[in-house]
Structures are given as structure tokens and as C-alpha cells.
Image: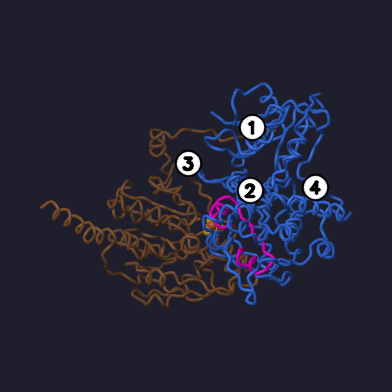
Chain colours: A brown, B blue
Amino acid sequence: MKRHFRDIVPFDQDSADRAIEEGHGLHPLDEYLKPGRIPHIWCPGCGLGVVLTTYIEAIRRKGIPVDKCVVVSGIGCTGRVAGYLDMDTYHTTHGRAIPFATGLALVRPDLHVTVFSGDGDLFAIGGNHLIHGARRNINLNVICVNNFNYGMTGGQAGPTTPVDARTSTTPMGNAEPGFNLPHLAHASGAVYVARWTTFHPRQLVHSITETFDKKGFTFIEVIAPCPTGYGRPNKLGSGLEEMRYYKEMSEVRNGADPSKAEIRLKGKILCGTFINVERPDFLETYNNLVIAKAQGRDKGKAA
Amino acid sequence: MGKKVGMEVSIAAAEAAALCDVDVVAAYPITPQTHIVEHLSELVANGHLDAEFVPVESEHSAMSVCCGSAAAGARTITSTAAQGLALMAEIVFIASAMRLPMVMLVANRALSAPLSIWNDHSDAMMVRDCGWIQVFCENGQDVYDHVFHGFRVGEDPRVLLPVMINLDGFILTHVIEPMEFWTKEMAKSYLPPFKPVYRLHPDKVVSMGAFGMPEIYAEQKMAHDVALRNSRPVIDEAWDELARLTGRRYSAVEHYKTDGAETLILAMGSLCETASLAVDQMRDGGKKVGLVKLRLWRPFPFAEIRQALAGAKDVVVLDRSVSTGGGSAPVTSEIRAVMYHEPSRPKIHCMIAGLGGRDVTPDDVSNMVDMALAGTGAEYYIYGVRG
Ligand code: SF4
């Protein structure tokens, strides 16, 4: 039997740079994407490309150099982002993006650490980490792409699947209510909470740029179409039709009470920047309280 | 016997669980196991299976739910793979030590890192010592039959242990194979209703999972070990009964063209079918090669392995995982240890192949045999590594 393997090519920065210079630059954002990793694996009509583009656009607009940005992602379709971005990224195991990012953010407070992951990864298997990250107010920017199901494994019900929605594990409709993510993030202590859909790329770019200036735990939920896993069983149509649904059914209300932001199947989607407050982040409190006390004691001893 | 019908192995496994009339299914999505659980959820939702389907939030919770339901006396099934098994490992050890019968289908997949969804046995070997009954299946029919077998053995009052059925991810889970199916009557006659011996019941209060102080911990470990070893006659008995019912005979160690073989290949799982093709080729070429299939991994079939390997000059073990920094790979280590005290023992070669979904063809198997016989000069050899 004949087998064809891809060649093992050691990574060569020179030729990568050359590839970018000579005609690899077919797309305006190519310099942010790992050469050779595109085309991506996302389905036609998937919302993930939009979210990735808005993130890149936000760092570009802010003029943050890529070596000051780190992206940490978990497992799932959204998790692939870490593999596509040409910067320091880390693809963790399922649900563990926030603990990894916490370690990183504490050791390197000078970096912009963004956690990019899906609703299943951040709120089911990794739910505990999210609430504690927000409680501690770690300096992290979380972008959660919510498509209401586990897309990568074939469209199973997850922590955000609305009541009555059909998925491959709830063929007669889901009996469990889904989380209201902005409400949960707010209640856990996030200092910035927003929700947009992929129909709102401009607002999303603006929101992401805002989070770069915020100290502490920020949370942006992006509602995105998953025509393959969630759209099909719920008869939401193609990715484009789902965008139409977002257009018609989303209502932008900045400053709205996140507890009112629940999403029902085919229901209204409340969007906007809901929360934007100041609270000392973990490192600040730690330095001012614990370290200062410890130093004071040392001084006392020395005297 | 019955007519053969083509069906995807995952779907068939779920159908078997439904015929066993399971009460609780708790699982978290992970490739390549998902079709099994999805089909079970469909059967529950359509009203074909009267069971609770719990779409938990992680594998750790899946196994915890299974422990709870088994402790309450419900017939319980779950399924996972690789990272999922790693995450649930804490509770996997607890399920067996608390003697909670259940069946878990493990769609064998390589452990991360690097992240891989493809098949090898590194996940199963990680929990080798978890105290479950562990079988490796060769084909779809095998998987289907072993779901019934697993419940019958595990729930037997002489056993009371969880059963892990290993099936190679993608190679088995995602293929359509011709299979003979059981009827409801067959399932009923083969599998008596679950009568739990130790269970949580409001009328008879017990505590489960309590502390084991130093003066009792070792006794518990020994009791568990004895229980697992003593499950062997029940496992055989259930295979005998299965043979009477279906005409298909399974055993702990199986032979293929081993008569007069000087060299024996030893393999587990779906690789056995590939290896049997290689044996055919090599026999045609005049080489005295046979195949020993190891189906029952725990409790380990010492006597049968000793007997099977005694007459050979060389044994080539095909391992599907690496024991990094160790003496050889897990299966080879076991085989070498078992044969060590034998008066005449074959030379035991360790060939590691098929890691992370790398295909192993019959030609690869014959190559590995040739290389092993020529001598690789090492305790173990990872086959097919590119430069
Ligand atoms: S399964 Fe859904 S989320 Fe995943 S790539 Fe396809 S459309 Fe996107």
C-alpha cells in the first residue's frame, strides 16, 4: 500500500518572512496569520472567521505589537484560533485556557493576554475557572464565542443550549436552560461585560479595543452562527440567514442589566456593553496588601 | 445463526446498550466516541429506551454521575476517549475500588500533546492499573457482543466490578461492518436484571467512599485485587454462554495459525485483523509465523499466555503506546515479566507502531517481524519514525 506523508519541514523564519513578502500577502491580515495554516478548517458560514478578524483588527487599530499579545485557547472549533494566529499562542487542554492564562498574566503583567474560546470550553468543562478568574479579577481579556452547542464534536447540547433547542444529544429538544453568560460573568466579578453578534463586527472591534485598556477581568460574548452543528437541527438556515436573524432580532442597549440578557431559542438577542466598572485587579491588591505588609514586617525586623 | 446487517460500530454498540435496557447514560462529547452517545440520546429521546440521559459538563462529572447511579442500583453506561479518560481518571479508580458495576466504551485515541484525535492505546494504558475488567475488541461484532458480556460479568454478584471495553477510535468506531444482531429475547435470557448487592438505599443506610485509615487501606487493596482475579471464571462462563447463544466463541487469548509457528506475533485490538493478513502472507512465503491475540487485558490471563508462547522461538509484541523512559512498552513489559520464570522462554521483541493514528498495514507487520528477527539491537523499537 502506498502512503503519502506530508514532509516534515523545520520552521524557517527567513522563508516564512519571504513568503509573506512575495505574494503570500494575498489577504490584508496575512501578516497576522501563520503562513501555511490557511485555509482554515471552519465550515462555510461559520462565524469564527469574523471573530478572529475583529480581534486582529482591534490589535491593529490599537497599534499593539504582536509580541505584546498572547492568545490562549481551549479545545473546540474556537480553540483553533491559537493555531492560526502568527503570534505567541497556546492551545490548552479542554477547559483549561483560563488557568494557563492566569499564570501567564501574573508573571508577565506587561502582556495583553486574551483567552479565546467557546461556550462549551469556558462554561462547561472549564466553568469553574471562569468564575474564579473573574472573582480574582485577573488581568485577562476573555472572548467567548457562543454558538450554543459543541460544534467540533458534532453538535451536542452544551451549557448555553437554550430550552427546546435541538442538538445531536437532544433530538426532541433540550430540557435544560442555558446560561446567561453576561449575567454570570458580571455576577462573578468581571469589570467589563459586553455581548455582540457576528453581525456587529464594528462594535465588536471597538469593544475589544476597550478591553485592552482595562485592568482586570473582561468578558465579551460573541454570538456566532454554527450552521453545521446548531443551525441545521434548529432550522436556522445557512450562516447568512443566521446573520439575518441577528440583524432582525438583536437589540443594542448599552448599559442594560445583564440579568435581562437571557437568550431563548430564536428569541431576541440583547447586545451592547453592559458593564464597565473599575475594581482593583488581583496583582494590584496583592502588591498593595500582601507584599507591602510583608516588606513592612521585614523592615521592622531589620530595625 | 442470524442474518448479517451492515451498521456503524458506534451505532451498534449503542443499540446493544439499549437492548441491555440501561437505566442511566452520562457522557461528555469527545471524538471519536460521540456517535455512541449521540445514538443513545436519540434512543432515549425517541422513547425507544427508558433511561436517564445526562449531558454532563465534563468527563469528570460523567464518571461521577455513573458512580452515583451504579451505587443507587441502576444499570449504567458511559463512553469516552483519550483526554476525556484522563480527566475522569480520578473517578475511574474509585468506581472499581467501590465495586460499582458499569460498562464504559473507550474509543481508544492518542493522548495529547501534541493534540491528536487519532487512534492508539495510550489512553487505555494510562489507566491500566485502575482495577476494572478490561477487554480489547478486534472488530465490530466483537464490540457489540461485549456490551452484553460486560454487563453480565460486571453485575454478577461474584464479581461486582466495572468493565472497560476498548475499541479502536475511527478504525472501529466509524466503520460500517456486517454484524449479527441480538434479539430482545436473547438479551433477556443472557442478561438477568441487575440486582445490586451493595447499594445506597434509604431503608438500609450505608456510607460509601469513606476514609480508609492505614489499618484498613492495604486490606481493601488486596480485596480489590482478589476480586478482579476471581472474576476470571465468571468472564469465561459468560463467554461460554455467549457461544451457546450466538455461536461466536471468544476467549482471553486467541490463536491464529499458531500450529508449528516458530515466531509469534502478539497484538491487541483491531490490529489483530491486520496482523492475521500479514500472517497469511508470511505463511504463504514459507515462514513459520502465527498470531496470538490478547483480548483480556485485566485480569491478565497468565496461564494462557505462558502456554501460548511456550513453544515459540521469538515473540514480536506489537505495542500501540510508549512507556516513555521505561524498559519497553506496556504490553511487552507485561509479557516479558510473565515469561521470565519459564524454563524455556522465547526471545521477546518489542515493536511500537501505529501511534497517533499512523496506519499499520499488513506489510508493516511483516516488516516489523523481519526487523525484529534480524535484531534491532534495542529493548524496544518505534517503527516507521521519519527522520
Ligand atoms: S462546526 Fe460550527 S463552530 Fe465548528 S467550524 Fe463548523 S460551523 Fe463553525
User: In the rendered image, is residue B358 in sight?
Assistant: no
Q: Which residues are magenta?
A: B66-91
Image coordinates for residue B238, horizontal then vertical, percent: 80, 54
Q: CA distance from mark 3 to mark 1?
A: 34 Å
Q: Chain of mark 4?
A: B
In the image, what residue type sits under mark 4?
Answer: Tyr
The residue that label 1 is drawn on is: B351
The residue that label 3 is drawn on is: A36
Q: Main secondary structure of the magenta part?
A: helix
In the image, what residue type sits under mark 1?
Answer: Met
Question: Quarter holding the N terminus of chain B?
Answer: bottom right
Tell me if mark 1 has few (under 14), some (14-19) or many (20+) residues whose alpha carbon lies within 10 angstroms of its own. many
**Does mark 1 have its CB less than 8 Å from ligand 1?**
no
For this orientation, the residue located farthest to the top is: B374
**Does mark 3 have its CB less than 8 Å from ligand 1?**
no
Q: Nearer the viewer, mark 2 or mark 4?
A: 4
Q: Chain of mark 2?
A: B
Q: Chain of mark 1?
A: B
B359 to B33, vertically: above or below: above
Asked if residue B383 lies left or right of residue B302, the reply is left
The residue that label 4 is drawn on is: B250
Q: Nearer the viewer, residue A36 or B97?
A: B97
Tags 2 and 1 both on a single chain: yes
